[in-house]
Each structure stands twice: as C-alpha cells, then as structure tokens.
Image (cartoon, helix red, strand yellow):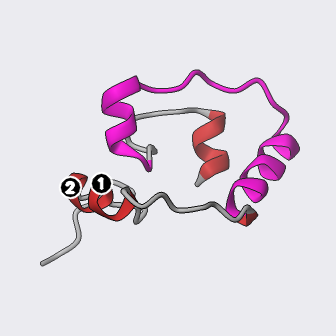
Amino acid sequence: MIVSFLEAPTHQKALMKPAIKLFDLMPKQILSHNQMINFSEVLMELDYEEPQWFNEHFESHKLNLEHTDNKKEPQ
C-alpha cells in the first residue's frame, strides 16, 4: 500500500487521512520501484517511540489505518 501510494498519491490511497486534511497530498516521489519498496520496508521495520499524547490524539481523530479499496462492504 505504501509503494502504491508513493507511485501515485491519491486521496483514496491515503492511509493518514487527518494528515492529508492538514497538509494535502504529498507530491509523487521520483524514486525507482525498488527504492520505494526499500523505503516502505524501512518505515515498517523502524521502532518508533510513541509520544505520551499519541493515544489521545489517535482516538480524538478516529484514525482508520485499515486499508479500504473504496468498495462498500455489506452490513
């Protein structure tokens, strides 16, 4: 999903909707496909220190990090 977004950023592919609202879409990255794969692997493998305020921030924005392909699922 990260590589797909880096290749062609769209609002539909965005995983961090609140960041898109604040900063708009990032420009398309001028990287090779392999560089994009390596970049996404680094992002996923890094250990990030979670700030004390993060959980409250996460809940307040109701961030949805699950991937959707814009198809409505039956309820």
- Front in this rendered view, residue 49 or 75: 49
Relative to 54, is 40 on the left or the right? right
Q: Work out which quarter of the rendered image holds the C terminus and state it.
A: bottom left
Crowd class of label 1 (few under 14; some 14 to 19; many from 20; radius 10 Å) = few
Q: Is residue 4 above or below residue 11?
A: below
- Front in this rendered view, residue 2 or 71: 2
Residue beneath label 2, please? 60
Please provide the residue range marked out in magenta: 15-44
At a point 62% along the width and 50% down the height, the residue shown is: 2
Q: Is residue 61 visible?
A: yes
Is 57 covered by the magenta stretch?
no
Magenta segment main secondary structure:
helix
**Given the image, on which type of amino acid does mark 2 rest?**
Ser
Count the labels in the image.
2
**Given the image, on which type of amino acid does mark 1 rest?**
His
Is 19 covered by the magenta stretch?
yes
Relative to 1, is 40 on the left or the right? right
At a point 41% along the width and 46% down the height, the residue shown is: 16
> Where in the figure is residue 61, as x and y percent of width and height?
23, 52
Q: Quadrant of residue 42?
A: bottom right
Q: Is residue 20 above or below residue 50?
A: above
At a point 52% along the width and 62% down the height, the residue shown is: 50
* Dots 2, 1 in contact, CB < 8 A: yes
> Where in the figure is residue 33, as x and y percent of width and height?
82, 41
Q: Work out which quarter of the rendered image holds the N terminus and state it.
A: bottom right
Residue beneath label 1, please? 57
Crowd class of label 2 (few under 14; some 14 to 19; many from 20; radius 10 Å) = few
Relative to 11, is 57 on the left or the right? left
